[in-house]
Amino acid sequence: MRIIAGQHKGRAIKMPRGIRPTQNKVRKAVFDILGDVSGLSFLELFAGSGAVGLEAASRGAVEVELVELDRAAQKAIEENIRVMKLDNCCIRMQDSAEAVRDLFSRGKKFDLIFLDPPYYREFSKKTLQTLSDYDILQDNGLLIVQHFKKDELPDTLGVLSLFKRSRYGDTVLSFYRKLKK
């Protein structure tokens, strides 16, 4: 697995064992749809290897927070951050729901939020609900959920509204915008 574009294009990403990394074609699709992320803040929940957040950092995201609870994955992310000398990246060693509540309590907001929870456990829907309840998305921000094709996600949930869904084999990317109040 390698960084696809930006300052660290071609750089190998250290991968922890036992995770399902976001495939290169899916990662490329995310950033093709998002376009230029330079100057934006980026949050990756269920970071795993951190590949999506690291890609955002390589492409110019000004601030990247990666949330991961698994210790082996944390070590791999920390090593990737160190090797790439990414001063704009930090890792939160927390459960994703706990991290969202903590970020909300500190008034933190992100331009882009990406989540790729483990498949088959309804984490996508639960995390989407948490993100709707604890609004940490900027007014013009986007939220992207990578999920299994059989996971049904709502078209709207609280302040979030689905505007695009793309399928890549068994993987689906659902893109949400924040509804205006």
Image: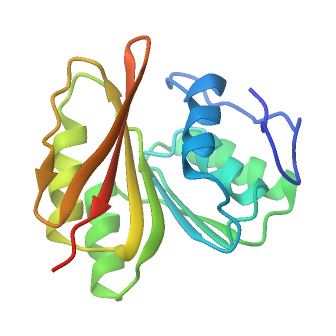
Query: From the viewer's perspective, is 153 left or right of 21?
Result: left
In the image, taking residue 5 as reference, residue 146 lies left or right, namely left
Relative side of 137 to 92, left or right: left
Q: Position of residue 90 (x, y in %)?
A: 62, 67
The foreground one among 82 and 55 is 55
How is this picture coloured? rainbow
Q: Residue at x 86, y 54 (%)?
A: 84
Q: Residue at x 76, y 48 (%)?
A: 80
Q: Position of residue 179 (x, y in %)?
A: 21, 68
Residue 67 drawn above or below residue 150: below
Considering only vertical position in the picture, is 114 above or below 111? above
In the picture, residue 99 is in which quadrant? bottom left
Q: How many marks?
A: 0
x, y percent for residue 133: 14, 68
Q: Quadrant of the N terminus?
A: top right
Q: Quadrant of residue 107?
A: bottom left
Which residue shows up at 27% across the image and 85% down it?
Answer: 105
State the quadrant of the C terminus: bottom left
* Rendering coords of residue 122 (x, y %): 17, 33
Place residue 149 in its image quadrant: top left
